[in-house]
Amino acid sequence: MTDSFQPKPEHKFTFGLWTVGSIGRDPFGEPVRKPLSPVEIVHLLGEVGAYGVNYHDNDLIPIDATPQEAAKILKDFKQALRETGLVVPMATTNLFGDPIFKDGAFTSNDARVRTYALQKVMRCMETGAELGAKVFVFWGGREGVETDAAKNPLDGLKRFREALNFLCEYNLHQGYGYRFALEAKPNEPRGDIYLPTTGAMLGFIATLDHPEMVGVNPEMAHEHMAGLNFLHAVAQAWDAGKLFHIDLNDQNYVRFDQDWRFGMQNWKQSFFLVKFLEDVGYQGSRHFDAHALRTEDYEGVKDFARGCMRTYLIFKEKARQFNQDKEIQSLLAEINADDGSMDAFKGKFTPEKANALKEYPFDRSAIARRGLQYERLDQLVTDLMMGIR
Ligand code: GCO
Ligand code: MN
Ligand code: MN
């Protein structure tokens, strides 16, 4: 399709090696696609027009590769990046796949596991820096419990904090200049994962030694699994200056982690999210952390990847229309109209203001009688999204 919804580098669309590289294994079924090498994945992403590729250490270099094997893989990967023009904006460590992490990585009860996790992250930071990554994501998939008999949640928090404090210092010491982005998820694979939401992560960051270095990587599906409003989580992260990265995908509410194509299910949520990112001028990657349905072959995987980017761009265009739509904008202006009658109470606290406000005679029923026209407004958005405005 050649229309105006074609991905360009300035859109900063990225995919993880593990996303388009997913072979479609699930807890009930075997793989449905043959594995692609990292080089093949980079070429696939180049073909569909992505800007960048992100990776876990072991998506690229198997956990038991020899130094010689690792060097060869890295050389071939860099060559593929040069050939396609793709960049590597983000790197992350797999701290969940190997059996050693069955009871967590940073929060494991075993000090050897916790220390090995630090080593694994430091090694990944080195490779990521070599590939040019500037954002380093931490998703603690195994950092949690099935039974609270096993671990005191305060120990979990303390260990997580100690690990991040150590790694922040390491980042400074090595001069890597990474920004760390913490990704929350309520459950899966653990029964309960610590720090289950973006809001919880934001609270936790304030307790670190280097809060300025650490932000969040909110994921749409994860907040939806918890039944939350993703846009609100993203807005809070933005407000705190902590939106370092974002994982876009889709899924039904309160289900297991479905990781569907962006915009596949929740159009309105996705629309308002894109509108938000574009309106505030978010400059980071738009990372699609999703995978193609298990029904697909690699042509279908390309359809999936193209679809994520295309839908984003369609919503971006719809957001532009929303901002220029006279009827919508005049309705918004009307809804937010301010007759100035409260001006005397605005701004900073003074005792005089407080005293005057305490005495002010509000006409409650007159104020409450006003209809707010949100029905009309929302229908205008629906018409706009459905293409009949
Ligand atoms: C998941 C997570 C992961 C992380 C990835 C990057 O549900 O499996 O979303 O895909 O985003 O590990 O850190
Ligand atoms: Mn996820
Ligand atoms: Mn994710």
Image: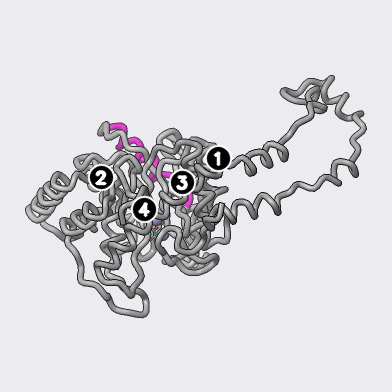
- Sequence-earlier tag: 4 or 1: 4
Residue holding disc 3: 317
Residue holding disc 4: 309
Spot the residue most to the front: 388
Q: Residues within 10 Å of mark 2 (few under 14, many from 20)?
A: many
Q: Is residue 226 above or below residue 296?
A: above
Q: In what element is the residue under mark 1?
A: helix
CA–CA distance in space, label 2 to label 1: 33 Å
Q: Looking at this view, is 300 or 253 the one in front?
A: 300
The amino acid marked with disc number 4 is Met
Q: In what element is the residue under mark 3?
A: helix
Determine if residue 98 is in view: no
Q: In what element is the residue under mark 4?
A: helix
Decide if ligand 3 comes within 8 Å of the CB at mark 1.
no
Q: Position of residue 63 (x, y in %)?
A: 20, 59
Mark 2 or 4, which is nearer the eye?
A: 4
Residue holding disc 1: 323
Mark 3 or 2, which is nearer the eye?
A: 3
Q: Which residues are magenta?
A: 157-173
Q: Which mark is residue 88?
A: 2
Of the four image quadrants, the one with ligand 1 is bottom left
Residue at image position (68%, 42%) is: 331
Decide if ligand 3 comes within 8 Å of the CB at mark 3.
no
CA–CA distance in space, label 4 to label 1: 21 Å
